[in-house]
Image: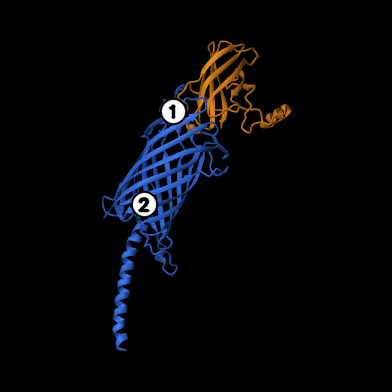
Chain colours: A orange, B blue
Amino acid sequence: MQLDPRRQRHVPAALLAFAAAACGAPPEPDARDLSGLLSQAGALRGSFTPAPDPPATGDNSLAMQLALVDGAPLVGAALALEPWMPAHGHGTPTVPVVVELGAGSYRADRIHLTMPGHWEIGIRVEWGDTADVFILDYDAR
Amino acid sequence: MKSSARGRPVAAWVGAAASVALLVRAAPARAQACCTTTGSSEIGVVGRCHQGLLMAQASYEEALGSFDERGSYRSLEGSAARDATLTLAGGVRPFGPALQLYGALPLRVQQRALAGIPEATRAGAGDATAGARLMALEDRMAGIRLDEPTSLIPFLEPVVAVRLPSGRAPADSRTPSQADVTGEGAYALLGGVSIVKFLTLDESLSVTATYGHRFAHRAGAAASGSRRYEPGAELDAKLAFFDVVDLHWSWTAFATGRWTAAAASDGRPVPASETRRIRVGIGGARYLTYPTWQLTASVAADPPVSGLSQGIPFAGASLALGLRRSFPY
Ligand SMILES: [Cu+2]
């Protein structure tokens, strides 16, 4: 899986701060908004919820809600995740495992972030004869 | 008159004897100052007045926090990284005092305890270094006297070295916590200069600066094919003050800095991948038997101050104990 290192465009931080203020909970300084992201080729939309949130050094999992851009939930897709530390040029020895929960919902476990710092989580999604990629920015503490 | 005439040669003899005694006392003290100071810029480096050196240094480092890519310091929460290293090093001046060849091989035992990942302790060789130094200028070690321009000349040694990827690279890791990663996976070519200047008879200042080119290598993870990863160039600097207390004892205070330029992946620069690491430390050395066996001890730490360092995943404190066997001429 060769992932394009181009980054996702994120909702501006001000919007995130506003949303968090509206909920009454102060935002974590490093929490990134991972909802409503567009895939690199523009075929998919995904919302991602890391656990723990914000991501931490150690074992992490990721809840994913995926849909085609027309809004139809993406079912039966094959997902492969790759944590990558771009500044250090390394990934992890452990391959995350993904289960499909239905109605466009997927969950990845065993995302092993082996040190604090900036990670990219590459998610390659294959359905039918089509493939697209999300890249999530993580700041593991 | 008679007695004073007789007294003058006696006084002269006493004075001469005292001077000789002082010189005899001072010569080894200066030699100790010379060797301790010129041999301390890097592990394995032979002091100026010695022909060879064999040494072993045991060190322990505990990670206490990390600096993110913006330089914010944060304590480690729920994870631990502990490294014990035995470094075997040595050097020799094979063709006279000017040129020395030296090298060091670290043997590492690393423990990683990361939340939710099986705790692991792994051992292995780290990245070995080998280098050469040429004594281009020599300090007369008489201290600085402004009326004597030659007293400003320092010890000056150009340095060239290679670092070999003898440790296990991250791409070859088989342990979930990556406790088995003991090396960078890249060859590096290093060049720099080491300068030592005696400010007085027994106090000196040393500056070492080394530029390192780290070669590109293939990097890959379990889930992917490989990419071409080019680590950024590195600049290492060390500033140290030495005080030689007497024939056997000396102490030092030092600061080290390590800067790395941005990395590139498949030819594209990696944003925010520059790093900086500033450490400070103190150490002492004692000759068990002068001038052959010397014991060294030092502590060093990453000051937990945001903005001082950046892009350092594991920062903390370390303790090192070393035993040096020098071979005088
Ligand atoms: Cu890393």
Which mark, by number, is residue B120?
A: 1
- Residue type marked 1: Ala
Q: Position of residue A123 (x, y in %)?
A: 54, 21
* Residue B325 position (above or below residue A3): below
Instruction: Tell me the residue at 38%/62% (across/down).
Output: B141
* Residue B104 position (above or below residue A44): below
Q: Marks 1 and 2, Cα distance to the nearest angstrom?
A: 36 Å
Q: Is residue B34 left or right of residue A65?
A: left
- Residue type marked 2: Gly
Residue B245, image quadrant = bottom left
* Residue on which the image places disc 2: B39
* Residue B51 position (above or below residue B233): below
Q: Nearer the viewer, residue B274 or B303?
A: B303
Host chain of mark 1: B
Q: Earlier in the sequence, mark 1 or mark 2?
A: 2
Residue B261 appears in view = no
User: Tag 1: Cα neighbours inside 10 Å, few (<14), some, or many (≥20)?
Assistant: some
The quadrant the N terminus of chain B occupies is bottom left
Instruction: Single out the residue that lies furthest toward the bottom.
Output: B1
Instruction: Single out the residue that lies furthest toward the front.
Output: B3
Host chain of mark 2: B
Q: Nearer the viewer, residue A129 or B181?
A: B181
